[in-house]
Image (cartoon, rainbow, N blue to C red):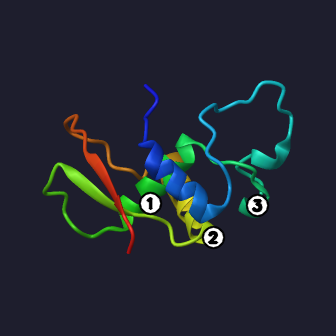
Amino acid sequence: MMPTFDKEVLVTIEKIIGIPFIAELYLDGSVCFANNDEVRPEFRQHFNVFHVLDYVNASICKSELPLKTDFIKISYPTDSSFFWKQVAVGAMLRKSDLLEEPTTEKYFEIKWHFK
């Protein structure tokens, strides 16, 4: 199941980091290496849902507050550099299985805000 985010959230992130959100993970006929995760962020031409999820994962993991509610507050990135640094942290957590396995399936609503 592909996660979805409110269009308003994605448009706000687009404005902050200066590149568009692309819903399709693989564009037809695209052979450009510019959007590969190994490429430096300043050369990327778009971001996708997995970048946003990695950003969210990094934001949750750095938070020291216990999750006592049915929603999680996530701050919008302050700039492109911060966004991509958080995405890299979230990707590292995801790839290294450092994210905790949930004992029960519980879904949270994400509420975005500016610092």
Q: Position of residue 67 (x, y in %)?
A: 19, 57
**Residue 95 placement, left or right of 68:** right
The circle drawn on residue 81 is 2
Q: Nearer the viewer, residue 113 or 107?
A: 113
Label 2 – label 1 distance at C-alpha: 14 Å
Bin the neighbour count of mark 3 within 10 Å (Cα to Cα): few under 14, some 14-19, many 20 and up: few
Earlier in the chain: of badge 3 and badge 1, it is 3
Q: Amino acid at mark 1?
A: Ala
**Observer-nearest of 55 and 111:** 111
The disc placed on residue 58 is 1
Name the residue at 75% across, 46% down.
35
x and y percentages locating residue 15 in the rendered image: 59, 60
Q: Amino acid at mark 3?
A: Arg
x 57%, y 70%: residue:
82
Q: Nearer the viewer, mark 2 or mark 1?
A: 2
Earlier sequence position, callout 2 versus callout 1: 1
Name the residue furthest left.
68
Q: Residues within 10 Å of mark 1 (few under 14, many from 20)?
A: many
Mark 3 and mark 1: Cα distance apart in space: 19 Å
Kind of element beneath mark 2 = helix
Disc 3 designates what residue?
40
Specify the quadrant that holds the C terminus: bottom left
Of callouts 3 and 2, the N-terminal one = 3
